[in-house]
Amino acid sequence: MKTTPALAAIMVAVAALSGCASSTYPTDTNYSTRADSSTYGVIDNIQVVRVDPATSGAGAVAGGLVGALVGNQVGSGSGRAAATAAGAIGGAVAGNAIERNRNMPHDMYQISVRLDNGDYRTINQDNVYDLNVGTRVRVVDGRVYRY
């Protein structure tokens, strides 16, 4: 079998990275962190806030790739190169616009909780269901639940 330089480089990379894998398991049986992950308190305030998420750039990258592929199918020679570049630019602009439209600003509930230990925590959630000011709650992994 004849190996190309690219295939050889991939094989070396796989061999090197497989040596990084660890097969050891944690032996610590201290479960005190479980109790710390949930905290109890009382809701002090609930406000509606407007969240305006930013674009990540993934839409522009995907759109640019699709546009470049479509543009590459047009023409030949320098015309093909120009069509590829124009397709990449147009696709990136369109992909970014699509991502921005999917990530429209929306309302979230900012819930302020006075914890039993005296601390104060503010959590943003997409809904409050039956939570009200003065409700006894439990905070688990960044969410507020009625207790």
Image (cartoon, helix red, strand yellow):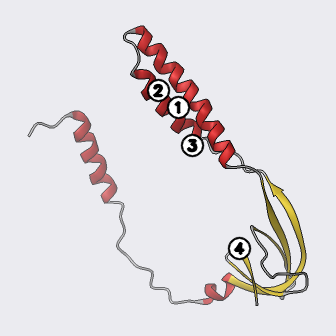
Which is closer to the viewer, label 1 or label 4?
A: 1
Q: In this view, does 21 lie to the left or right of 34?
A: left
Identify which amino acid the numbered label 3 is placed on. Ala
Give the residue pinned by disc 3: 58
Residue 59, percent from left and from top: 58, 41
Question: What is the quadrant of residue 18 in the picture?
Answer: bottom left
What's the residue at 41%, 22% (across, down)?
72
Give the residue pinned by disc 2: 68
C-beta proximity under 8 Å, tags 4 and 2: no
Identify which amino acid the numbered label 1 is placed on. Gly
Above/below status of 67 relative to 30: above
Neighbour class for label 4 at 10 Å: few (<14), some, many (≥20)?
few
What's the residue at 82%, 81% (across, down)?
131
Q: Earlier in the sequence, mark 2 or mark 3?
A: 3
Q: Quadrant of the N terminus?
A: top left
Which is closer to the viewer, label 2 or label 3?
A: 2
C-beta proximity under 8 Å, tags 3 and 1: no
Local secondary structure at mark 3: helix
